[in-house]
Amino acid sequence: KGAPAPLGIISTQPGVLLGGFKTALEYIDEIHVSIALTGRVPVNVTDENGDIKVGDRIAVSTHMDGYGAKAVQTGYTVGVALEAFTQVATSSVATSSILVFTDPQYFFADTQVYVDHETGYVGIGTTTPQYDLHVDGEIAAQAFINVSTRDAKKDITYLSPEDKVDALTSIRNLQVATYHYTNEDEAAPLRMGLIAEESPESILSVDGKGVDLYKLSALTLVGVQELSQKVTALERALGISLSDLDPTSSAPEGNSLLAVVLSGLKGLGVSISNQFVHIVSVFTEELTVGSEAMPTGIQFYDQVDGSPYCVRIHNGEIIQKTGLCEAAPPLETAVPPEPVSNGADPSSEQPDPVQPTPEPATDTTTDTPVDVPNSQADLPEQAGTEPVVETPLPPVEEQPQAEEVVVPPVEDASEQQEVVTENNEPQA
């Protein structure tokens, strides 16, 4: 850019001079030189760009006017070297004269544009292209067109619903990474993309070393379609439309997503508020309340007055307490019930204690009637007592007024006792 294209090589001894010099007066004082347009011409060259080999393109020297040098950058050249020139180990630039075949044309350096004559692959920025056009660098364009007409394709098969589900799974499992290419400096901006070895085969290039962007975009499209179907099914189940939601609101009121979801659940008989879930009816084959690490209880409410009761399991027994389960004290620190006089466990059912037979009384009053059992068999058997012999009782005469019997406390109920009336007649 900015450098004029060379016209040719000056020849001091042209084999054939074709003329063409202007003879007008305005050109009389100009220097007339012969320009070699074709053929072999001796050319002064330097070794500034390295050794010159037969076949190398010769460009204009950037250090010495009127000299040529080996072409190493893309640009204009004047011909092809027919002789070699080896670099001389000196501190200054060496010069020489070699035969050059005149052939002015634009030259592309191999490091910038390279054509593999065996495969026909073209490389830009690389001398080892692996594709028809292999660019080692960034590309800018207004559009990239993929040939998609049906006439240019065959073996067309559309994806099944199962394939679309698999595509969504593949997208979910993609690992996106940041990285540098090996030929980039560490200070260069990080790139973002996929690693071929970690990506599904469906989006890789033929050789498996690259990601086919068109395949990747098609896979993404399938994933979006599958997500759209799932959202539609969710809207249908909840009876809502996500298009009516306010995407900027997260409050559980108005037309936010949370409010609409809660409203839809309420229509199904499920309401959520204050960390509680209310369900109208539950049918289940198995229900687990609490866990081994955090045992808890079940909350019930009295049908009459609505009082709360918490039912728990403690040492294999069902225990109920008044109040909410969350308000009930932990089982480890629960206050034990008041013990009874004989030390029995109040949680276990015990038969009514047997009233001991009183000692004979000397002074009694008869205000209330006394029911006297007909036989000793009517009394429950007490543990640790001797066998009781049944003794018939004499008939009891009717009294016009019931008498009150005062029964003193008895320390040992294991012995046979008697009940004495006012007439000092033993009854049993």
Image: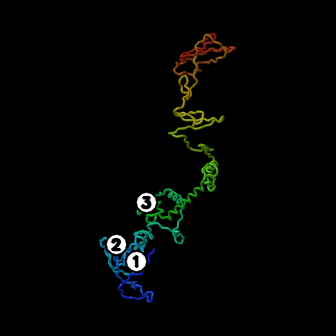
Distance of label 2 from label 3 (alpha carbons): 32 Å
Q: Amino acid at mark 2?
A: Gly
- Could you tell whether 24 is left or right of 306 in the image? left
Residue 101 shows in the view: yes
Distance of label 1 from label 2 (alpha carbons): 16 Å
How crowded is the residue under tag 3: few (<14 C-alpha within 10 Å), some, or many (20+)? Answer: few
Q: Position of residue 109 (x, y in %)?
A: 40, 72
Distance of label 1 from label 3 (alpha carbons): 36 Å
| Residue carrying label 1 | 77
Question: Observer-nearest residue: 369 or 298?
Answer: 298
Give the quarter of the figure containing the C terminus.
top right
Q: Secondary structure at mark 2?
A: loop
Q: Position of residue 18 (x, y in %)?
A: 40, 88
Residue drawn at the location 64% of the way across and 17% of the way down: 370
Q: Position of residue 327 (x, y in %)?
A: 57, 35
Q: Amino acid at mark 1?
A: Thr
How crowded is the residue under tag 2: few (<14 C-alpha within 10 Å), some, or many (20+)? Answer: some
Earlier-in-chain disc, 1 versus 3: 1
How crowded is the residue under tag 1: few (<14 C-alpha within 10 Å), some, or many (20+)? Answer: many
| Residue carrying label 2 | 50
